[in-house]
Image (cartoon, rainbow, N blue to C red):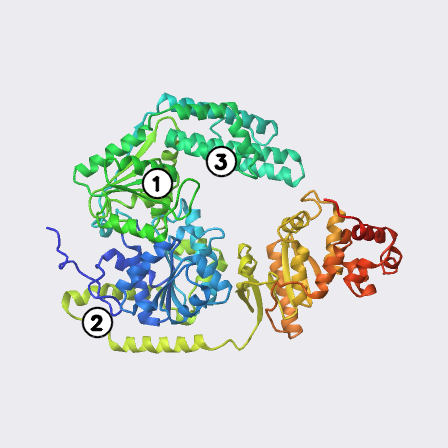
């Protein structure tokens, strides 16, 4: 007989809302391990990873005080976690704050100081760290939700590096239902987050099995109509023709139409090499490659989604081809005879893809047999809208898509997303049709059927989706497979990757020492606790497992074995930590101010991690970086620099002119290689521009190889200015109207395009614009640098009759 709500044991803790958290042994055990070391917690979706993190946070608050930072990749997730923490923690709601891009930076800085729990998107925290608005020194627990994202340049990686370097007593918890496809991927996440322990629980573990039910995957084979096959084959003929052209260029070995995306990415790399070598074939090949990618997508759409989705895609292609600045690839495709034939066939096909009717049948069958909720996942927003409209004729269905608007398809605001999920939870409608937005961590309620409209080739996404069923009752997962299409290949790839992931997780389960051995030595050192605060690992595991085990004791026997002495010590620690955090740094150091828009580059982020350097973000009116009261820097990549010479939105001369008005030592950094090779600009034009920057504007023009080299140079200049020359950083100057003298130079310099140098010479000679304009040719030649040809051109422009 099932336990009633009153009989279910609850977690008891001085910082947790009484009776709010159900006491589950596996969560207690995971929290016990995560309390002792930087830990990756792997637990199936819907089984309470967030609760594990909450238990660790409560213990850290009790032992050390400080702050807790919880990072989640999307705004809806952030809001969801904040709601849970406010319900679960016995601290004032105003001390649990949300940081997203919708909160102003200045407001975030003030909120951070007073908050005990900050729940945020990682990009916001990254910006605040780079800008020096917040400090991680007091953060005693940092949680990375959906931590499998911690690869490459994702913000999690930078934040983890800063946390381990800045925090007084760091502890990291990474959470994911699916941290990677193989051991290498899992280890990469561990290294990037400074994690040394991996704790895995699956549905097979006895403690977890009690809370799950079987979710066997069924796959339904769908026969594709002949008309759809004919459309596909027509598109494949064009793909084959384009691949033959790429083969002739020597960038691909075969023209088979089932070429993989990986191979096509390799082709793109080869074409980029040709472009870098200034070979025109590279540009031609890149355009052909774009055609192939568009056609491959069209084939995939018609096979797995249907003709209606293909028509929507074709319509976007036609609009794209008609737009200003349309790519040649789009224009060629819509005029290609065989593509136009495919379009005609699509227009004539009146039937729906058989997947639609199968989806309807399965949804109705589930609901008739007593089910209450169904989720249908699809890769494409067009299909989500088609499915929602089609299903709504028979059941109550609503769509759930991302926030961005796309052509012909409006996104959903965060408020709309929340309203739809709330309505789904409370049973206001029966079928949710969702794109990938519902995959990661959102508290979508348990459902009776999860239907994949097409297979998902990525193990992570497949596991996330299946996690939506089988939490409380036996659920069902169905994958629709269009026969003899890429659907089948994707499905088998997904199955193989899931099995590989499960195998690797089991190998890693409980073997923290082996994981640590494989980490880079510097990463292990980064992840270590401060030696002064470390205890014997083995005894700590036992102690904490016992301590967390005691969470439920009060509810069961009426006693609480946590003494008041520990709470007093914790309070003392909090007071001490707060006092230390408020003390200014006596050592000073170098400060570099970066423009907010420079965050697209890694330079400010790189500088912010360097010892002795503080970065600050501002919206600079002039320059990209300020290094002292007299040095500002305008950074240009080679591509950007050359673009300003051939008609960019705002020429580099205007930008440097603005900068030179307010900083006596303006610097221009040109970053990258190929200054004289990248674009069709005559070398003498480039040399002339460099000379003008140096002579006319008094700017120092420096070259760097890449962003890392630029960061090194900025650090050196700032060091010389602030330490050697003892100058302070001062942000001043705004783009403003030109001074009177500059306006006079501009007017005279524009006559016959004589330029600023000759303009200054003429104004110095004659004293006013009026005098220059009324001077004779002989008088003009008396000015330094003005010869007969220039004087004649000026008189011709000034004296000739205007004729439109």
Q: Which mark is residue 105?
A: none
Q: For numbered disc 1, what is the local secondary structure?
A: helix
Name the residue nearer the viewer: 507 or 582.
Answer: 582
Quarter of the image for residue 38 reads: bottom left
Q: Which residue is mark 2?
A: 561
- Classify residue 274 as left or right of residue 210: right
Q: Earlier in the sequence, mark 2 or mark 1?
A: 1
Quarter of the image for residue 767 reads: bottom right
Q: Please state the horizontal and vertical placement of residue 110, each as a whole percent of the image.
A: 42, 70
Name the residue nearer the viewer: 340 or 3.
Answer: 340
Name the residue nearer the viewer: 411 or 454.
Answer: 411
Q: Please state the horizontal and vertical placement of residue 513, each as a whole percent of the image.
A: 39, 56
Q: Looking at the image, which residue is at 25% across and 70% down?
A: 14
Number of numbered labels in the structure image: 3
Q: Which mark is residue 319?
A: 3
- Classify residue 99 as left or right of residue 635: left
- Classify residue 519 as left or right of residue 474: right
Q: For numbered disc 2, what is the local secondary structure?
A: loop
Crowdedness of circle 1 by 10 Å Cα count: few (<14), some, many (20+)? Answer: some
Residue 10 shows in this picture: yes
Q: Earlier in the sequence, mark 1 or mark 3?
A: 3
Q: Which residue is mark 1?
A: 499
Crowdedness of circle 2 by 10 Å Cα count: few (<14), some, many (20+)? Answer: few
- Classify residue 587 as left or right of residue 550: right
Label 2 to label 3, Cα distance in Å?
A: 70 Å
Mark 2 and mark 1 in contact? Answer it, CB < 8 Å.
no
Q: Looking at the image, which residue is at 67% across and 73% down?
A: 725
Above/below status of 765 relative to 452: below
Q: For numbered disc 3, what is the local secondary structure?
A: helix
Q: Please state the horizontal and vertical placement of residue 563, each as a whole percent of the image.
A: 24, 75
Q: Looking at the image, which residue is at 35% across and 40% down?
A: 499
Label 1 to label 3, Cα distance in Å?
A: 43 Å
């Amino acid at each position: 007989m099932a336990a009633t709500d009153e009989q279910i044991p609850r977690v008891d803790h001085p910082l947790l809302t009484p009776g709010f958290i159900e006491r589950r042994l596996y969560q207690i055990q995971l929290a016990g391990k995560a309390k002792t070391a930087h830990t990756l917690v792997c637990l199936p979706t819907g089984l309470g990873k967030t609760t594990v993190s909450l238990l660790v946070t409560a213990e850290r608050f009790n032992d050390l005080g400080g702050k807790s930072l919880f990072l989640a990749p999307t705004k809806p997730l952030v809001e969801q976690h904040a709601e849970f923490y406010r319900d679960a923690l016995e601290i004032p709601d105003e001390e649990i704050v949300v940081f997203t891009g919708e909160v102003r930076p200045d407001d975030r800085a003030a909120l951070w100081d007073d908050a005990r729990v900050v729940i945020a998107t990682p990009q916001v925290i990254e910006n605040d760290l780079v800008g020096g608005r917040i400090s991680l020194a007091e953060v005693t627990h940092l949680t990375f939700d959906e931590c499998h994202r911690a690869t490459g340049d994702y913000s999690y990686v930078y934040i983890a590096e800063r946390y381990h370097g800045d925090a007084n007593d760091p502890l990291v918890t990474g959470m994911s239902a699916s941290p990677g496809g193989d051991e290498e991927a899992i280890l990469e996440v561990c290294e990037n987050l400074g994690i040394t322990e991996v704790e895995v629980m699956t549905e097979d573990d006895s403690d977890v099995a009690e809370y799950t039910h079987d979710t066997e995957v069924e796959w339904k084979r769908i026969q594709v109509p002949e008309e759809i096959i004919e459309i596909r084959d027509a598109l494949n003929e064009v793909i084959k023709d384009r691949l033959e052209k790429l083969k002739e260029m020597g960038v691909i070995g075969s023209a088979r139409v089932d070429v993989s995306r990986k191979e096509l990415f390799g082709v793109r790399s080869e074409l980029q090499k040709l472009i870098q070598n200034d070979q025109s074939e590279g540009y031609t090949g890149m355009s052909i490659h774009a055609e192939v990618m568009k056609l491959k997508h069209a084939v995939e759409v018609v096979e797995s989604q249907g003709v209606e989705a293909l028509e929507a895609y074709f319509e976007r292609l036609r609009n794209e081809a008609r737009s200003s600045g349309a790519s040649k690839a789009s224009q060629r495709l819509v005029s290609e005879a065989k593509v136009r034939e495919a379009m005609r066939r699509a227009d004539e096909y009146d039937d729906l893809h058989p997947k639609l009717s199968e989806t309807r049948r399965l949804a109705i069958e589930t609901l008739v047999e007593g089910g209450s909720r169904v989720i249908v996942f699809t890769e494409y927003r067009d299909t989500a809208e088609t499915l929602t409209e089609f299903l709504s004729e028979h059941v109550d269905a609503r769509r759930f898509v991302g926030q961005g608007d796309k052509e012909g398809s409006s996104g959903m605001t965060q408020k709309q997303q929340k309203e739809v999920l709330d309505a789904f939870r409370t049973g206001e409608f029966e079928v949710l049709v969702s794109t990938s937005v519902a995959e990661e961590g959102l508290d979508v309620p348990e459902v009776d059927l999860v239907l994949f409209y097409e297979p998902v080739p990525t193990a992570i996404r497949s596991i996330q989706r299946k996690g939506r069923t089988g939490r409380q009752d036996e659920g069902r997962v169905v994958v629709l497979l269009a026969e003899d299409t890429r659907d089948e290949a994707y499905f088998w790839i997904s199955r193989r990757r899931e099995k590989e992931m499960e195998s690797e997780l089991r190998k890693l389960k409980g073997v923290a020492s082996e994981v640590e051995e494989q980490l880079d030595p510097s990463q292990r050192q980064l992840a270590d606790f401060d030696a002064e605060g470390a205890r014997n690992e083995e005894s700590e595991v036992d102690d904490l497992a016992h301590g967390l085990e005691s969470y439920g004791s009060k509810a069961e026997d009426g006693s609480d074995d946590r003494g008041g002495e520990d709470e007093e010590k914790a309070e003392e620690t909090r007071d001490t930590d707060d006092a230390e955090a408020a003390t200014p740094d006596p050592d000073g150091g170098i400060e570099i101010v970066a423009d907010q828009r420079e965050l697209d580059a890694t330079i400010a982020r790189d500088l912010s991690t360097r010892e002795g350097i503080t970065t600050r973000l501002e919206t600079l009116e002039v320059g990209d970086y300020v290094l002292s009261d007299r040095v500002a820097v305008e950074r240009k990549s080679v591509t950007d620099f050359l673009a300003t010479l051939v008609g960019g939105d705002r020429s580099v001369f205007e930008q440097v002119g603005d900068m030179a008005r307010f900083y006596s030592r303006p610097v221009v950094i040109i970053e990258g290689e190929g200054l004289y090779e990248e674009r069709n600009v005559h070398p003498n034009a480039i040399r002339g521009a460099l000379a003008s920057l140096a002579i006319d504007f008094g700017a120092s023009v420096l070259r760097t190889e890449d962003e890392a080299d630029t960061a090194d140079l900025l650090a050196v200049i700032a060091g010389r200015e602030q330490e050697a020359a003892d100058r302070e950083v001062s942000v001043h100057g705004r783009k403003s109207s030109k001074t009177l003298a500059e306006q006079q130079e501009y007017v005279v310099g524009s006559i016959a395009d004589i330029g600023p140098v000759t303009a200054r010479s003429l104004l110095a000679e004659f004293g006013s614009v009026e005098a220059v304009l009324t001077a004779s040719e002989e008088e003009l030649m008396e000015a330094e640098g003005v010869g007969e040809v220039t004087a004649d051109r000026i008189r011709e422009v000034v004296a000739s009759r205007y004729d439109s």
